[in-house]
Amino acid sequence: MTQDVPASATPTRTQVGTTPTIEPTPSGTATETPSATPADEGEVGWGVVTVEVATGDVATLYEGPDTFRPGLGLAFAPWPEARNGGIWVSPTTDESTRYNLDGESVASVPGWGVIESAGGGWRSWYVRNEAGDVRLNVWSMADDGQHFDVDGRNASNRTFSADGRWLAWLDASPADENLIMAMDLATGDVTEVARVTPCACDGYHYIEWSPSGRYLAYEDPAYQDPSRQGVYLFDTENPDEEHPGFAATAVVDGWVEADETELLLVLDDGVPTLFPVNVDEDPVVIQAPPGGAVRAGTLNGLVVVSTGTGAETVTTIYDPVSGERVRELRGASDAVLTSRGIATAVISRNDLTCTGIQVDHPAFEERLECNAEDLRWSPDGRYLALIPQAASDPVSVLDVTTGTMTEVPHAGPRGTIPSWSEDGRYLVWVWGGEL
């Protein structure tokens, strides 16, 4: 279903061989916090801090006030996140800096809101040209330096496909519709995937690529026309075909890959349902209580469903092919699907008091003393971080392969929860609030 693309979305293509405006910082640069205008008392700002688990070394990548100019519309800077061994920080709209997770600055671009494809082959960011217009830049990091740019004034929710072949985003240019756009990075061609009803809640729609990068799932709330309401699928290999729809009352929650089958996970009236998209099979309904917060497992093709809150949380792991229950956990819990099996950790609570943490891993099983408000498994399931609420208390990191526990500094404000780097070497705090 390729539609006419608005003039604002027509890409400008730079010929192969053009060098992108990216300034690498010489290796060996000392770790420094980017300079920022001193914050006034009570001013709101944000910060990015990392801790190397093996050494406990802390690196402050940025800490300062929010200096973004008003009037940028939906072209906002995304919350920084660790990717491909580094993190992009945009203190202003004029420049963004990429840091390795040890704090070394390694590159910069004249713009803001930088995101990267998996593997770092492509980067996208916003830039304001001499005329004052916001442009959306897309650069290849290969030697040919291929470059595209489109009108970025109303572009948001950008996402690269897993294979690095496509970039999708939402364009809120029309007053009564939002456009879901997709760029073929091999050619720079832009396709208008769909025109959808603006969301009354947050202004944009959920779009997510399948694990192979072939399919793009998106939502259309269609408040005024219920016949259009639902979740839809864009097939990049057959862009002119009608987009199949799934469950009119559903919202997209993720993808699962099992036995070379890609399954789209949606919440249909609160019930998790899996739709196979590349094989002719019936959908799988997960028999979980309605209203649960659902997340899709990405390893070993399992689905994790969490319902309830606090001590009443129930986390259940399902086989997506059969819909059968694999394991059920009660209490505030965290689960990760590792190459060695399912790793879980459950916080037992008495009222609001933590009484213990039960760790269950193929290489380790033990009950630990409780000093944690939250838990975070590393992506590979080797490390479990026990996060205290008080910033003055250290974070305890359990290596389940050896049973050893290491303490590292809690590098964020009280109550903030870090994320793991992809390789499990660093804890990353990105926080916002009063400075």
Image: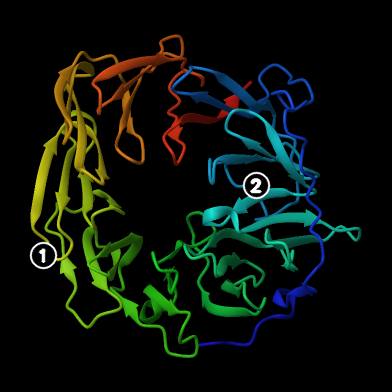
Residue at 58%, 65% (x, y): give it: 169
Amino acid bearing label 1: Ser
Residue located beneath label 1 in the image: 322
Looking at the picture, the colour scheme in use is rainbow
Amino acid bearing label 2: Ala
Q: In the figure, 21 relative to 369: above or below?
A: below
Q: In the figure, 275 relative to 288: above or below?
A: below
Mark 1 near mark 2, Cβ–Cβ under 8 Å? no
Residue 416 in sight? yes
Q: Is residue 30 left or right of residue 424?
A: right
Image coords of residue 232 (percent x, y): 39, 75
Residue located beneath label 2 in the image: 77
Q: Is residue 307 left or right of residue 87?
A: left
Give the CA distance from mark 1 to mark 2: 41 Å
Between 1 and 15, the one nearer to me in the picture? 15
**Nearer the camera: disc 1 or disc 2:** 1
Image coords of residue 422 (percent x, y): 45, 41
Q: Secondary structure at mark 2?
A: loop
Between 256 and 85, the one nearer to me in the picture? 85
Q: Secondary structure at mark 1?
A: loop
Q: Is residue 370 left or right of residue 211?
A: left
Image coords of residue 173 (percent x, y): 67, 69
Image quarter of residue 403: top left
